[in-house]
Image (cartoon, rainbow, N blue to C red):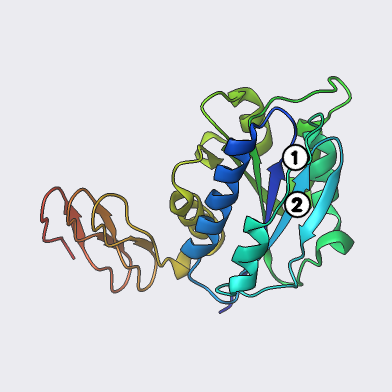
Amino acid sequence: MDCFMDIVLVQDDSSSIPHSLFGNTKQYMVDFTQCINSFDDRVGAILYNCEARKEIGLDEYTIGDLGLEADLDYLMQQGGITRTGPAIRYMRDTTALTWRNGARRVAVVLTDGYIQGYPLDDHEAEANAARDDGITLYSVGIGPNVNSAVLLDIAKIPPNVFDDTDPCALYDRILQDQCPGNGGGNGNGNNGAGNGNGNNGAGNGNGNNGAGNGNGNNGAGNGNGNNGAGNG
């Protein structure tokens, strides 16, 4: 493939994240890796509170390796105050993560958005600096009570802000942004066939047994509602 991605998951493990919610977020990250449909992509992970620390390097696992899922599941929460700006700055460091030459660089910050250390925490400036370095940022709000303004500061645009309910929707957005010709897609609703844009897109199914929506060559078709047969 001429388009491949390095994706870094940057997870807030500060004390404002309840322990049970931290566990749910780990499962979200495991589920996110299962949405990825390219063995050429790589996933790394950083945890942060007042300081950031690398947990999984981009050079450690390939997609589908059970060791990646096990290591994500084994991540341990430390607690402490929340400093998102330094975590983004740490993520930009190529020596910390081993970014690959030629890879599309992506970072996903998973946080409730509550930051301690204003005005010292410069999360917006650090996010902009990451974008200047060619890294596209997405944010995922953890839990029901989030600071939406901070999530938008990180991601820059509303379509790059997500909640913690649908990891495949996040991956689909990343894939369409970074590698629009390689859309494999994932389904929404019961038996959705998936969402694909570009060549060989599998389609997007919404509702029960929706057959899917394909844009581009070999699109599978569009079905919405119960037993929609689809439009090719």
Give residue 118's position: percent from left, percent from top.
Answer: 83, 20
Crowding near the residue tagged with mark 2, few <14, some 14–19, many ≥20 C-alpha atoms within 10 Å: many
In the rendered image, the vertical position of residue 54 relative to residue 114, given as above or below? below
The answer to whether residue 226 is left or right of residue 148 is: left
Residue 200: image quadrant is bottom left
Residue 61 visible within the image? yes
Q: Quadrant of the C terminus?
A: bottom left
Q: What amino acid does circle 2 point to?
A: Ile
| Residue shown at the point (79%, 41%) measured from the top left | 78
User: Is label 2 in a helix, a strand or a loop?
Assistant: strand
Q: Is residue 3 visible?
A: no
Q: Which of the two residues, 150 or 51, is positioned nearer the viewer here?
A: 51
Which amino acid is tagged 1?
A: Ala
Asked whether, in this view, residue 189 is left or right of residue 147, the answer is left
Q: Which one is closest to the eye, mark 2 or mark 1?
A: 2
- C-beta proximity under 8 Å, tags 2 and 1: no
Q: Which of the two discs, 2 and 1, labels the residue nearer the N terminus? A: 2
Residue reaching furthest top? 119
Residue 5, quarter of the rendered image: bottom right
User: For this rendering, which residue is in front, 70 or 97?
Assistant: 70
According to the picture, the residue beneath numbered tag 1 turns out to be 127
Measuring from the top left, give residue 122's x and y in whole percent. Answer: 83, 30
Task: Give how far apart the Cα atoms at labels 2 and 1 are.
Answer: 15 Å
How many marks on residues?
2
Residue 99 location (% of width, % of height): 77, 66
- SS category of the residue bearing label 1: helix
- Near mark 1 (Cα within 10 A), the count class, few <14, some 14-19 or many ≥20, is many
State the residue position of label 2.
46
